[in-house]
Image (cartoon, helix red, strand yellow):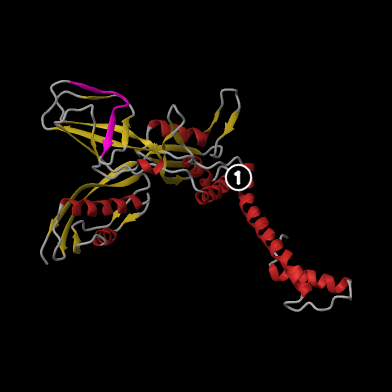
Amino acid sequence: MFQIKDFRSCVASMINWMKATQEKITDFNVGSVARTLVEAPAVEIEELYQQFFIGLREAIPVALFRAFNFERLPAALAVGTVTVTQGTARSSDLLIPEGTVFLTIDGREYKSVQDVTWLTGTTFVQIQVEASLLGMLGNTSAGTIVQSSFFDSNVVISNLPINNGRDDETEEERKIRFSDFILSLSRGTLAAIKFAVASAVVKSELGETIEYVARIGIEEEIGHVDIHIYGSGGIASDALVTQAQMLVDGYELEDGTKIPGYRSAGIRVTVMKMTEQTINVTMNVSLFPGYSLTTALINEIKARIETEFDSIESGSVLYMKSLTDAALSVAGIKDIFVSNESNIICGNDEVLRLGDFTVIEVNV
């Protein structure tokens, strides 16, 4: 077994060897000439041991990952929805072409991913966009995408929060994913099926990841497993569901090579989309002196509440106390009461989303 020797051990080993092989030099005390002569190389030898250790520590996992061809996940583009609204209904259809540019307050760029038609008789249109910047730099808060040169000045542009941009996978994240991969090697197990589904991605024509599986819910019965997935941009697309189902069932490459799936023979596994359960929340708040219920303060409370909603996994419970604690963390909030009376159960096939959000100031 590889063992590191420190400076003292190196010096002791060399002195012991000198004592055992000759009798002319007998003074090995601290400060002696003989001891000084062996202390100098001992410093370098200790450093060499440390370098060997660090190199081995870094090389072993890399060699292991490469042996399994287990590369780090690349960064993913942030994808979200922009809403364009005008005061009166449109008198004619308006084609909004793919690639239409939208800008945030700080100048970051987003482009529409497909052609969208703003229909006659409607006052708003929703457009799916993706960030030009790769990774988490493309994430942005609600209401920060505000302009586009394509539209007239009489429209209002806004957006829902976009937070699904993902940076390159870190080494620590790869280690965690590799542990799940090892559990999946046996195939046929629930862990293996879950790993296969989590590996599904949708890529653009340029090979950039534009959608990946963000959440997984599992409902298991004898001989049948339902897998519910939620995409990084919201409700999973048909393409993401198809990709996940293909990985579970197995598929065949163009050259005829068969890639085995992850489900057991005779077990039916169905991949489906999660649904969204919208929860309206009303809060009565009292403020400390010197604070007023401004739009900025309401938006800050809303952001904290949305974070709590995002943290609720499928199959778990959203407790009203967690919403209260989240709101109380905002500066200026003295006390708060959530009007929703009961905790909310999130099913395995759904995701909780914040609906209408109302804040009412009360005097205590």
Q: Is residue 128 above or below residue 310?
A: above
> Closest to the observer: 111 or 278?
111
Residue farthest to the top?
92
Q: In the shown orientation, is residue 43 left or right of residue 248?
A: right
> Closest to the observer: 314 or 209?
209
> Closest to the observer: 217 or 117?
117
Q: Residue at x 43, y 37 (%)?
A: 271
Query: Image quadrant for the N terminus?
Result: bottom right
Residue farthest to the front?
33
Q: Is residue 299 above or below residue 138?
A: below
Local crowd size for mark 1, using a 10 Å CA cut-off: few (<14), some (14–19), many (≥20): some
Query: Image quadrant for the C terminus?
Result: bottom left
* Snapshot quadrant of residue 3: bottom right
Q: Amino acid at mark 1?
A: Phe
Residue 99 located within the stretch drawn in magenta: yes
> Closest to the observer: 156 or 220?
156
Start-end of magenta stretch: 93-104
Q: Residue at x 28, y 41 (%)?
A: 106
* Snapshot quadrant of residue 204: top left
